[in-house]
Image (spheres, grey):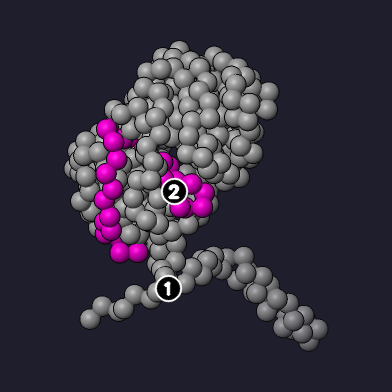
Amino acid sequence: MRRVLLLAVFLPLIGGLLWWYFRPRALPDYGPLYREYAYVSNGKSNTVSVLDMTPRPLPRFNVVRTIPVGINPTGVTANPRKNEIYVVNTDSNNVSIIDAERNQVSATIGVHGRPYFVDVAPDGRRAYVANSGSRNVSVIDLDRRQVVANIRVGAAPGLARVAPDGASVVVSNRSDDNLSIIDAGGGRVRATVPVCKQPEDIAILPDNSKAFIACASSGQVAAVDLKEAKLLALLDVGKTPVNLALKPDGGEIAVANFDSNNISMIETTTNEVGSSYLIGTHPARGVVSADSSRLYVSNFGSNTVAVYDIDNGKVISSLPVGDHPDALALSASEDYLLVVDAGSGDVAVIEKRQPTKLEPGEYGLLTITQVGLQPNNIAVKAFRLSKPVAPAH
């Protein structure tokens, strides 16, 4: 009798513990108005592909809309405050504004010659477009939908990067080997700083104190004091540094050295190159997780994506994707990495998994979705609709 009583007491308890351990993991309650899309600019199709990443309960990663834009779209950026996407069309010298709620072009704004890049101020009210063929930066008032200034900078500006506080805009002038620092409030160039040969990619620290500029022709990264507008150091990295991936905490920058098949890690406090690691053939782009633990690198020449453990200093996964992987983006949850394959015209989706005996790896290829011809850039926008969508009849 005593044994029966003990079993009657403990069996439900053990069953409850087993159910809790093996229960289906609850997904976040995103609500019916939540949407998450990836926008991919297709350079040779003159379109933007919209991939549905909304959890229902899992994202489908299917193309739900193909949006015609201008000629040769090369840059795409999401507004942090509005449900809008901005697409730079290099060969038609304009910017397409996409309404993310309807996934339609709501406006087209003309800029100057051969724009390649657009960045948006943190308050979402201004956009800055570097016009490589016109030696200037167009400033767009996003509320009024018009260009309010064209600020003259150096020759062949590649990028115009807005500082986190929105007070400065840093422009890399590729043919003049210098950078322009624009006072965003005054709408003028505050200073011009000589750096190194063919500067292009820019990373600005979260505290707005420094900018780091990758110089492809000299194999260097320049560290610049933004307040004093002066060069602090020229750091020797690998051959043809093309991309800077900044850790969210601002402590380190990963430099993708395209022609030496490695990455260099820069300590931003001391302005020193800490170490270099082989990563793959022709690394092109990198993105760092929000907790600064993982670096994802697209290897353009080996058709792989490397997952690099920053704390331990080693590659923990090398995953095959499509042809010539280039631009990268993480989903809002960071459970998925999207890889734009420029050569095969598709987007590979890498899934972060819970390792099991059958699938011991932490990462795996989930799916590949066809987009347009020569896709080159990607932006992810997660938001809530401003009003409910009427049900389909």
Q: Give the residue at x 74% y 81%.
A: 9
Q: Amino acid at mark 1?
A: Pro
Residue at disc 2, secondary structure: strand
State the residue position of label 2. Answer: 126
Front-lying residue, 339 or 137: 137
* Of pointers 2 and 1, the one earlier in the residue sequence: 1
Q: In the image, which is nearer the foreground, mark 2 or mark 1?
A: 2
**Horizontal and vertical percent position of residue 222:** 54, 20
* Magenta highlight range: 101-128
Is residue 179 visible to us here? yes
**Horizontal and vertical percent position of residue 109:** 28, 48
State the residue position of label 1. Answer: 32
Q: Give the residue at x 39% y 41%.
A: 149
**Horizontal and vertical percent position of residue 289:** 54, 43
Front-lying residue, 230 or 10: 230
Q: Is residue 152 above or below residue 10?
A: above
